Amino acid sequence: MRIEFLRERLESLGAKPGHVRRILAAWLAARPLDAGARRQPAEHCLPRALREALPALAHEWANLACLRSRHPGGDGSARLLVGLADGQTVESVLLPRDGVCISTQVGCAVGCAFCMTGKSGLLRQLGSAEIVAQLVLARSLRPVKKVVFMGMGEPAHNLDAVLEAIALMGSEGGIAHKNLVLSTVGDRRVFDRLPHAPVKPALALSLHTTDPALRRQLLPKAPAIEPAELVALGEDYARACGYPIQYQWTLLAGVNDGDADIDRIADWLEGKYAMMNFIPFNPVDGSPFRRPSPERLVEVVARLRRRRIVACLRDSAGQDVDGGCGQLRARSLADGAA
């Protein structure tokens, strides 16, 4: 379902632009739909037909994304299995420090070799309202001030819906634009459209290596953009929007944690408006990949920091609940088939 459809439904019930903004703002804040900024009674400012329809609308919108199960982690995070109205499920993650990671697709078509989500391929796109509904669900559980589009799916493959969701979150949703972070493997449509969007999110680029041949192996269905060009495109966007590019690099022992790869990315990022998030591989049953040793993880980060590049280790939230992206959904499907 699209956000525009929600607006049209409200307008068909007599809502004026101010009414629409009020109701959408209440929804995104996880408050009753008739709640105003100053808590005015609905009968003082909403048309009667609209007031009478709000309970049914609230029920319908709540079903866009409902909580199937919650799995708290020891790091303050919580992985959520989210049910959609058609019975499909996606994953969201409540992050420490008032953040939420949300999904944009059921499944994913990129097929990253180290990611569970891509194993089942792409099942369907999420509508912009379903994307926003994950924020609403998260805010019903705890405060949320930051949204990262790093859950299931490749946002660039559902860009119209993602940009609609971002625009609403950055306006009626009250999320600071720099706290809306779109993660992508890199797609020229992202670099073409984001600079002209009404709400410009921060950008996270999934790089994972500087070696073009290795990147094609790790991300077999990603757009054919060389890693060096991705960094150049990222730098252009960073300078245009004013937020540093966040590069993502899943560290795989003996694959992309070697000195040559790490030193080359240091050469590329030195002096750039960028930061590097190294993500140690989250072990998955049956995967050929391994997590580097703790000592190697420390050395990889240190090599960039010695070049005055902002770099950190960012473990996937909820490691202790075996909930790497896609694992929770896969486990629930397996349990249902048993």
Image (tube, rainbow, N blue to C red):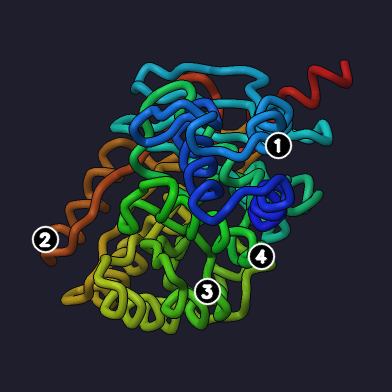
Estimate the spatial distance between the alpha carbons at disc 4 and disc 3, rounded to whole Å: 10 Å
Mark sitting earlier along the chain (2/3): 3
Mark sitting earlier along the chain (2/4): 4
- Give x and y (percent) for residue 196: 45, 79
Q: Residue at point 44% right, 49% down?
A: 172
Estimate the spatial distance between the alpha carbons at disc 3 and disc 1, rounded to whole Å: 41 Å
Q: Which residue is mark 1?
A: 49
Estimate the spatial distance between the alpha carbons at disc 4 and disc 1, rounded to whole Å: 38 Å
Q: Does 152 sit left or right of 282 as displayed?
A: right
Mark sitting earlier along the chain (2/1): 1
Q: Which residue is mark 2?
A: 306
Q: Judge depth for marks 2 and 3 and give the one in front.
A: 3
Q: Residue at point 57% right, 78% down?
A: 189
Instruction: Describe the element under mark 1 as helix, strand or loop.
Output: helix
Q: Residue at point 79% right, 17% down?
A: 335
Q: Which residue is mark 3?
A: 190
Instruction: Describe the element under mark 3 as helix, strand or loop.
Output: helix
| Residue reaching furthest to the right | 337
Q: Which residue is mark 4?
A: 157
Estimate the spatial distance between the alpha carbons at disc 2 and disc 1, rounded to whole Å: 64 Å
- Give x and y (percent) for residue 30: 49, 29
Q: Does 288 sit left or right of 205 as displayed?
A: right
Q: Amino acid at mark 4?
A: His
Q: Residue at point 31% right, 70% down?
A: 265
Q: Judge depth for marks 2 and 4 and give the one in front.
A: 4
Mark sitting earlier along the chain (4/1): 1
Instruction: Answer few, some or many: residues within 10 Å of disc 3's Cα (few below 14, many 20 plus, some between 14 and 19).
Output: some
